[in-house]
Image (cartoon, helix red, strand yellow):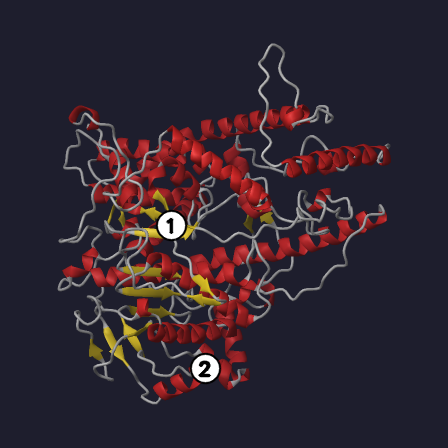
Amino acid sequence: MGVPAFFRWLSRKYPSIIVHCLEEKAKEYNGIKIPVDTSKPNPNEVEFDNLYLDMNGIIHPCTHPEDKPAPKNEDEMMVAIFEYIDRLFNIVRPRRVLYMAIDGVAPRAKMNQQRSRRFRASKEGVELVEEKNKMREEVIQRGGYLPPEEIKERFDSNCITPGTEFMDNLAKCLRYYIADRLTNDPGWHNITVFLSDASVPGEGEHKIMDFIRRQRGRAENPGYADLIMLGLATHEPNFTIIREEFKPNKPRPCALCGQMGHEIKDCQGLAREKQGEHDEFADTVPVSEQEFIFIRLIVLREYLERELTMASLPFPFNFERSVDDWVFMCFFVGNDFLPHLPSLEIREGAIDRLVGIYKDVVHKTGGYLTENGFVNLERVELIMQAVGVAEDNIFKKRKDDDESFKRRMKEKKKRMKGPSFVPGGQFAPQALGGRDRPIAVQNARQSAYEMRMQGNQRNQVSSNDMDNRGVKRKAEDSDSEPEPEDNVRLWEEGWKQRYYKTKFDVDATDDEFRKKVVQSYVEGLCWVLRYYYQVNHTSATESSIIDFYPDDFAIDLNGKKYAWQGVALLPFVDERRLRAALADVYPDLSPEEGEAYSFIAKHPRFNIPILSLKDTEIPAELCHGIQGTIHLPWFCFFFLYFLCFVITWAISVEIKFKDPQYDDGFVFKAVILPGAKIPNKVLKPGDWEQSNRGPWRPQLGFNPNRQQAHLDQSGFRNCQKLLFLLTEKHPKKLIS
C-alpha cells in the first residue's frame, strides 16, 4: 500500500521486523573491476529461492533521482536500471526464480488516483517555477549574487506509462539484459527469469501476487509452498521484503544559489565563501550510496499473532483469518485506490483503535470480517458504527493536539532567538558549582574552522539586520504560518452538515444521497480486498479529450495543511467519448507506433531450455515447480533477437509464458499450504523467565545460530582509539 507514514509506524511498533542488508562489494585490481560472484553463499546467512521485483520502484529513482545528478539521456537511464537490479541480485542471490514486473494498464480506480497525482504534480511544478523566478528577481534587486540559471532538459516522468515509446524501449533493453546475465553471470545460470512488461495489464505488485496465487492454486504442486512469497495476504510463512532504507532530512542545496544550509525562501544571494584554507570543507551535496533493509514478514506475523490472539471465543481462534481482517482494516487508513476516512490517521493510533474495536466485534458476532477476500458487511458495519461514535472526540483531540504543538513550536522559536554571542565547544561556559570537565578536541583544524564560520555568521546576521531596518517582514518570516482555509471545521458542532455541503453541495438530511455515498465507498472496499486476494479483470486504459485535462483545478485539502496532502478535484472521464477520440487517431499511427500499441505479447516472458516450440505444459521439475504453458510463434524471432543484441554463445532463449488457468468462480484459499516450512520463532517467548534461567538473547539477522561477540572494557577502549585515528585521517567524511 502506498500509504504515507504506514511503514514508519510499522517499523516503530514492531522494530524486530527490520534487518540491515549485508552487501558484498565489487573489488578493483589494477584498474580492473572484478564483479561479485553471486553463485557463492549469501553473506546475509540466508538463502532465498525467489526474487520478485516491482520494477516501477526501480525505474523512477533511476530516471529522476533526488540525491544525485539525473542521467543525461535514455542510455544512461537504462544502465542505471541494470546496475540497480545487479545490486539487488547481489544482495538477495535467488536460486530458483527471478520475476520482474513492470506496471501495465492499471484498474480504473487506480487510474483516478494516478490522474489526480499527476495533475497535482504538474500544477505544483508550475507554481515552483513561478516562485523560483520571483525569488530570483527579489534577490537580484537586493544586490545579491546568483549563478546563471542553467537550462536543463527535464525528463518527463509521465513517460513511465504503459503504451509509451520509453516503456517499449525499456522492455527491449531488459530482454537484452536478461539474456546477457543468463549467459555471462554464474549466479544466473540455474534460475528461471520472468519478465512481465507494460503490455501485460495490472500493476507490478499485483501481477506478482497473481502469479504467486495461481502457482499456489495447483493442487498437484504442493512443493511450491516453501518458496519465498509476497505479503501477508499470501499466507506464506517464508517471505521477506527488500527496500531502500529511508533516511529523513537529507540535506538539499538551495534551488537558487546551489548552496547548502538554507531553503529557497531564505536565500540571500551571497557568494559562496572559501571553506577551509584550501576549500577542503566545500559545501557540496554529500552523495552516499543507497542502503537496503530486509523486512521480515515472518516476524511481523509473530507480532500480529500476539496482538490479535483472542481468548474465550465461542469458536476456535484462526490466526490466518485474523491476519486477513487486519489487512482489510488497514484499508480504512488509506490505500492506492480509495481515500482514507478523515477520522482515522495512522499517527493518531488509528490501527490500534481499529484492532480494539475489532476484538469486541468478533466476540459479539462470533465470526471474522473476511474470508478468502470476501467481506461480511454486517460485521464491518459494527466496526464503522463504533468509529462513528468516537469521531467527534477524535476531531476535537486532533485540534487540541495541533494547537498545543503550535504553542510549543512558538516557545521553542523564542528560546532559539537568544543571544548568539555565547561561545560553544571547548569555550562554552561552565555551570556554577560544577566540576570543570575539559572537552577533548579530536580535530583542531576543524574546530578552528567552525569557530571562524560562527563568527562570520554572526557578522552576517548583524549586517543583514542593519540593512533590513524598517523593512516589513514577509509572511514566511513571521512567528505563525498562515493556516489553510477550512470550511468544514471538523472539531466544531455541525461539521457533518458543513461536510456534505462543502464536498458534495447537498444537505446532510438527504438520506438517499448519503446512502449512495456509503454504498459506493463500501463497493470500493470490497473490490480492493478482492483485488488483493482473488483475480480481477482490468478494463481498458483511460486518457482524455481536452476538457478532461484542465490547466487549473481545485484541490480539496480535506483538513490537511499542504497541497500535496489534498485531493485534486478533476472531471470524470467519459469512456464513450474517449473511445471515439481514439478511433480517429489510430490511422495516423506509424508502423512502429501501431506495433507498440497492439503489442502481441499478453503474458510474461521467461528464459528456460526449450523442449518444444508449440503450446506445451511445462514439467514442474524443469522450472523449480513453476507450472503454466509455453509458446513460441515465430522461430525466426530467435535470429532477430541475437542479431539485434549481438550476444555470442547465448545459452538462453526467449519464449512466451501463460499462467495456469482456472474455471470461473474458482476461489483462491487464503491459508498456509500443507507442507510449508515454518521458520523458528524470533521474538522472546512470553514465558521465557519462568522456563529459562539465562537471559534472552535476541536473534540478529537470519541465522539463529550466529555467534555473538562480546567486548570488555579494553575492547571498547580500542574501538575509541580507532575511531579517533579515523577522525584525524578522514575528518570530512566522518563529519558529513
What number of labels is visible? 2
Residue 716, picture quadrant: top left
Residue 391, picture quadrant: top left
Query: Between tags 1 and 2, which lies in front?
Result: 1
Q: Is residue 245 left or right of residue 91?
A: right
Query: Of 233 and 415, which appears nearest the observer?
Result: 415
Q: Is residue 657 in view from this perspective?
A: yes
Is residue 400 shown above or below 385? Answer: above
Q: Is residue 690 left or right of residue 196?
A: left
Answer few, some or many: residues within 10 Å of disc 2's Cα (few below 14, many 20 plus, some between 14 and 19).
Answer: few
**Residue at position x 55%, y 43% from top?**
734
Is residue 446 shown above or below 702? Answer: above
Q: Is residue 621 left or right of residue 637?
A: left
Identify the element where label 1 is drawn.
loop
Query: Of 575 and 130, which appears nearest the observer?
Result: 130
Residue matched to label 2: 595
**Location of residue 507 in the rendering, given as x and y in whole percent from the top left corner:** 52, 40
Answer few, some or many: residues within 10 Å of disc 1's Cα (few below 14, many 20 plus, some between 14 and 19).
Answer: many
**Location of residue 604 in the rendering, given as x and y in whole percent from the top left corner:** 33, 71
Q: Is residue 545 left or right of residue 465?
A: left
In three-dimensional space, the C-alpha distance between marks 1 and 2, rounded to whole angstroms, equals: 42 Å
Q: Amino acid at mark 1?
A: Cys
Is residue 306 shown above or below 97? Answer: above
**Location of residue 379 in the rendering, given as x and y in whole percent from the top left corner:** 27, 39
Nearer the N terminus, badge 1 or badge 2?
A: 1
For residue 21, the mark is 1
Is residue 77 shown above or below 585? Answer: above
For residue 291, the mark is none
